[in-house]
Image (cartoon, grey):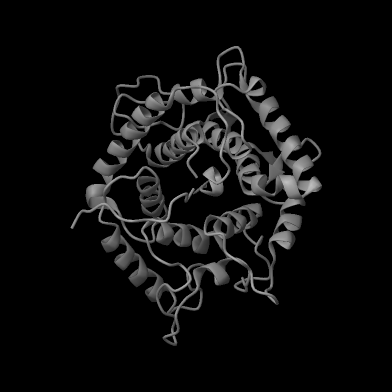
Amino acid sequence: MIHTRQLIKGITVVLTALVMILTVCACGRSSGSDYEKQLEGVCAYLEDIADDNLRAGDSGSDWTIILLSQADREYDYDEYLKELEEYVTECYKGRDKLDRVKATEWHRIAMTVLAAGGDPRNFGTDSKGRPIDLIAEGTYNWNQTDSLSTQGSNGLIYALKTLDIGDYEIPKGSLYTRESIIDDLLQYQGNDGGFALSTSAGEDTDITAMAVQALAPYRSENRRVEEAVDMALAYLSKQQQDSGLYLYDGGYSSETSSQVIMALCAVGEDPAEDENFIKTGGSLVDGLMEYRMDDGSFAHDVPKDPSETGGDNVMSSQQAGLAFVSLINSETGKE
């Protein structure tokens, strides 16, 4: 039965995004109605696709649920939650559980459970019939591999986001603390201020924006974090093209624009007004709008013909939608 659920508010993704909107941005621009219009278009596009294609536990499906929840859209969240719990229980029958090395599988699913109104600390059962704590096993007591960062810095980024979304306390004696996760994450920052996916890889704009989102809540209490975030923002400003867009992997990328928008909101800046992110071609928000399709979706690359339909714009639309959620919440002061 379709219904309006009573949910925990303030879940974010990219993050992802997702602590993506934990920090309220004191934005001065009054364009919330336009942001709401764009969010409506994205959600309508994803809902059309979702009718027969959502599969609980699938990354694309889970992120759609997270966005729809953040946008306060009606959906049968209880049914999705039921299917997701069955998925988790079935996965835990195997040796690899949710994944052999990716802690982010735990993080994304925990965020989805919260978005659908469930409790990720007691979700499904393992092979011995014991309740599964997705928060503990995916963050502070991760032992699937030797390190939360086995898959790269995103394992650390999303561990922080997952802990902060529910404001979860870490018990004494745990394998990780917030401080140790932050210390490990800072090791991935290069001299130019950008963060990399791995210590052997080059700096990456998307990873940098997501790192800023994860670190933003700790700026005021940690001088090292404050300096790291300032350096990362300077790097992101430098990477922005004169057009206001971002290049990624040989082409333009709306996902990067979306992630940087969420990063700026997380640190209390207005992505439409911050002078460091306004180039000759316009602001970050102007840049994101270059990717909009007539059907309400957002393309990965700048479209040659916005009236075309049938492209695979799911991921880019999800991230654009989360960016608009951040902008709306920033303007309204909603956490």
Q: Is residue 272 above or below residue 168?
A: above
The residue that appears at 77% across and 49% down in the rendered structure is 222
In front: 212, or 57?
A: 212
| Residue 214 image offset from top left, x and y in percent | 62, 49
Q: Is residue 244 above or below residue 116?
A: above
Q: Which residue is farthest top?
A: 280
Q: Is residue 23 above or below residue 139?
A: above
Query: Considering the image in quadrants, where does the N terminus appear?
Result: bottom left
In front: 30, or 93?
A: 30
| Residue 14 image offset from top left, x and y in percent | 52, 46
| Residue 70 image offset from top left, x and y in percent | 40, 46
Q: How many marks?
A: 0
Q: Which residue is farthest bottom?
A: 128
Q: Is residue 289 above or below residue 249?
A: above
Residue 118 showing in the rendered view: yes
The residue that appears at 37% across and 34% down in the rendered structure is 39
In front: 110, or 53?
A: 110
Q: Which residue is farthest front?
A: 333
| Residue 44 image offset from top left, x and y in percent | 28, 37
Residue 188 showing in the rendered view: no
| Residue 24 in the figure: left or right of residue 201 | left
The residue that appears at 69% across and 61% down in the rendered structure is 178
